[in-house]
Image: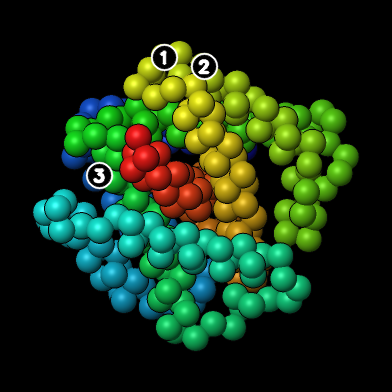
Amino acid sequence: MNESLTRALSGIVYIILLIASTLYSEISFIVLFGLFMFLSVLEFCNLINFSKIQALLLAALFILYTLFIPKSFQNDLILNCGAVFIGLILLNDLFKPGNQTGHLKNSAKVALLIGYIIIPFTLLMKYPLISNAEYNPYLIIGAFIIIWINDTFAYLTGRAIGKHKLYEKISPKKTIEGFLGGLVFALIGSYILSRFYTFQSATVWMTGGIILVIFGTLGDLVESKFKRTAGVKDSGNIMPGHGGILDRLDSIIFAIPFLFLYYQIINYVS
């Protein structure tokens, strides 16, 4: 089968599965993203050479925490700040010369696994509940739509007019023009979403869009650095033509702690 057709079909199946599971029920959403978490954990273990058994046990503990600990005893702010802290460490490493993530102690690998993969997935599963006590699938679908719009138009704009590299040593194909094009269209998409999903204002949707684009792009660069350090092109091969689950979700899992914190702040002050 033609590689482009394989990639297109694989992407369509992924999008249909994600949207259908998210819309069907909270349980189907959690099942799907719990599976995504476990697959991403396995892929990340390959990148950093960490024990898969230990990693899966850690992921299972967080799933149990999310599902079975009463919400009144769950402290999302502590989880959120921990993931933001790890994200900032990874950004500091991203722009430092040399390779700090290539020679990690086991304790550092555990911290990265929890803060970069497991907690973001936990927050992602909690995200549709952040505005109120009821499950709102359109919050998460809206976030993915913004990410997809940004990825599509960043690629198209970069192909059409991209001349200045965004961060060539990590991702040679990304351009500043592509990034700006993706941002502009993501903002337009965020505004259109606010006309359909009126449970949030246009300002909130568009601010969330900016957070998703900026930190999503940085998340893609962070994962690219992990892959470059590991000497691999993709994090896995479960999605023909696309690589691994982590390759598909690297943007949103890096951005979600910052987006989640933004929502916690506006919910607190409103």
CA–CA distance in space, label 3 to label 2: 27 Å
Could you tell me residue 251's position as x and y percent? 54, 47
Determine whether the residue tagged by mark 3 lies in a helix, strand or loop: helix
Residues at marks 1 and 2 touching, judged by CB atoms closer than 8 Å: yes
Of pointers 1 and 3, the one earlier in the residue sequence: 3
Q: Residue at x 30, y 35 (%)?
A: 131
Label ID, residue 192: 2
Label 1: few (<14), some or many (≥20) within 10 Å?
A: few
Which amino acid lies under the numbered mark 2 shown in the image of this protein?
Answer: Ile
138 relative to 71, above or below:
above
Label ID, residue 120: none
Q: Disc 3 designates what residue?
A: 30
Determine whether the residue tagged by mark 2 lies in a helix, strand or loop: helix
Q: Residue furthest front?
A: 269
Q: Residue furthest right?
A: 163
Label ID, residue 196: 1
